Amino acid sequence: MLEIKNLHASVDGKTILKGLDLAMGPGEVHAIMGPNGSGKSTLSYVIAGRDGYEVTEGSILFNGRDLMEMEPDERAGEGLFLAFQYPVEIPGVSTMNFLKTSLNAIRAYRGEDELDAMDFLKFVREQTATLNITDELLKRAVNVGFSGGEKKRNEVLQMAVLRPSLAVLDETDSGLDVDALKIVGEGVTSLRSPERSMLVITHYQRLLDYVVPDRVHVLADGKIVASGDAGLARELEEKGYAEFSKAAA
Amino acid sequence: MSITSASRAMLDRYEAVRETLPGQRIEWLADLREAAVQSFGKTGLPTPKVEEWKYTNLRALDGFDFSETPGNADAAVDLPDAVGAGPRLVFVDGVFRDDLSQLRDFDGVRFTPLADRLESGADLIQPRLGDLGNDQPLLALNGAFLEDGYVVEVAEKAEIAAPLEVVFADTGGDAPTVRQPRNMIIAGAGSRVQVIETHLGAAPSQQFFNGATMVTVAEGATVEHRRVQRQGAGSVHVNTVRARIDSGGIYDSFVLQQGAAVARDEVQVGLTAGESVARLNGVYLGDGSQVLDNTTVVRHATKNSISEQLYKGALTGSARAVFQGNIRVEAGADGTDGRMTNKTLLLSDKAEIDTKPQLEIFADDVKCSHGATAGELDDDALFYLRARGIPEAQARGMLVEAFLGEVIDGVEEEPIEPLLRDAVGNWLAHAQETDEG
Ligand SMILES: Nc1ncnc2c1ncn2[C@@H]1O[C@H](COP(=O)(O)OP(=O)(O)OP(=O)(O)O)[C@@H](O)[C@H]1O
Ligand SMILES: [Mg+2]
């Protein structure tokens, strides 16, 4: 469902991804781990279609279609979702309105009718209950004044509402306390399904204890330098990246 | 000093029409006009050499041919729906239209055209008409041609539930037109009233609107003054409001500036007795080569008075906006709290804002602040919305609406709120079409 071949990408003229290959099947969960600055967020932005991230070589196919040909909103319409490492604050737009507008935009893209206000409310309430998100938070402007943990839970809420077929989670476990980690971990796990693939970017084993990955990849200096099963993540946490970084050099 | 050709044309016109001006046989009125025209003649219309008019140039008026004065006393006009459920006075091409107005009697308020009151209401009207003064050229010009206008007179303690609406509509004939209404809002002690002015122009023809309004807010009274400026694209619009606020009184002003080629809304507030409050807010939406100017002058001349100002706008094309805010705190006006903020979204490379906040403080123990920002839409926010499936145009629209929402929230649940939100939505749709085209 996701097929990345020999991906080279640069930002502001600086090459960050240097020949990255990755293939994921439907319903699979892959984890990407790697040192700071290795290009993990860059990969997530390239997949989501952020301006300024230039693909200089290689290709990304999503369900057989060339992702590079699509606008960011079209990618979302096609079922792609990125949980941001640093969720953005949007003053003046309530979280509830934001959720509703995005869900309806995606439904419109797919030729589906808008949800009416009552159905939408009911649907959102079902999702917020498990994520321990209050109505008060939904009324507030998107991410404005949210704590780090609230921002991350809000990302998972959006994923729960938008029901993507591929979710890229960029350090959704960072900055969470133990309780919040549990909520996020269980929230993400509950969204796991045979129709939904997940690419989980993380530095820690702890999220992977909840969402056990089918494959784990090590990204160093813009390339995948090692891949393995769930055991690789535990090994990395013990030993660090040193030997893999050497391999990349 | 030489005066501009439009100024000369105004003076010539005065000579030509003065005997036919309404109420000219009332002596004090004729005197008032004469004094005003004398004042105006000394300076003529302001040019950018005058500090207060540095950023807004009225030279477009020099291209207007004012020699004709088309009479259009019963022109047909498409009026917008009433905003609220209150009475409505309608002026079309400067002429009061009984047939289009809804004059309903409300307990506690007299709401009439000025012309109706010149004789019968002279006791009330005469001193207040003069209150506006001739110290500014445009006020003097307005005084010289003093025609009709509206008068709102609210009895003590009366709380007027429905807004009082006034529509100034221009049908836009072939020749340039000049409209110079003079209005009065007089709120008795402890009373409460909302006045909504709508300025409309149908065609891109040349209209010069130069209005003046005197607002007196007695002790403990509240006046909410809303102005919706949507004059025709070829117009020059200047509207000057002077408000004097007594102890415990509140003057709450909101202006939407959207129409005209060159427009200036100027509010001058005197907080002259204890704990009075001025709230001045505005939204401006500019495109093409419009110039939209909001100028405020707030004078704190009493202890513990409060002024709050928030003006926000969005500009596209090569539109330019001006914000000039002056807060003056007189000696002895201790405990003053004066705040002013101006924020502009520049949606195109050629759009521009000239913002000039000024604080002049001669008292101790005051809290005064001003802030101004100008910038483009936040790319990160735009990407975030798009990554959630929201198409670019819609995402941009959401961000502009959210930006302006901060001001519009100030009139939340008022009759004009939906009108303002629609105005922003329509303006955006139009701006995006023009950008693509
Ligand atoms: N606009 C930019 N201009 C130049 N370099 C950039 C730009 N954006 C990112 N980079 C660089 O690209 C490299 C990869 O950044 P990226 O954010 O993808 O790392 P990461 O793997 O997500 O790191 P972390 O684990 O800290 O989140 C870093 O060296 C970063 O400084
Ligand atoms: Mg990162």
Image (tube, coloured by chain):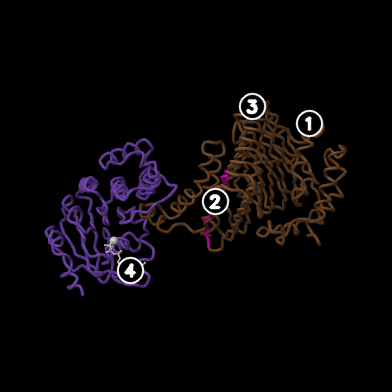
Q: Circle 2 — which element?
A: strand
| Disc sitting over residue B369 in the figure | 2
Q: Is label 4 or label 3 in front?
A: 3
Q: Quadrant of the N terminus of chain A?
A: bottom left
Which residue shows up at 22% across the image and 64% down it? A34
Residue stretch in magenta: B335-348
Q: Mark 4: which secondary structure?
A: strand
Q: Identify which residue is drawn at 55% across, 56% down.
A: B315
Given residues A227 and A133, the one toward you in this image is: A133
Q: Nearer the viewer, mark 2 or mark 4?
A: 2
Identify the residue at horizontal 68%, vertical 40% (top origin). Answer: B244
Dot 4 beta carbon under 8 Å from ligand 1: no
Please say if the residues under marks 1 and 2 sit with CB atoms less than 8 Å apart.
no
Numbered disc 3: what chain?
Answer: B
- Chain A, which colour? purple
Q: Quadrant of the C terminus of chain A?
A: bottom left
- Mark 3 crowd level (few <14, some 14–19, many ≥20, 10 Å Cα): some
Residue B44 visible here: yes
Per the model, the C-alpha gap separating discs 2 and 4 is 47 Å
Q: Which mark is residue B121?
A: 1
Farthest-out residue, bottom: A249
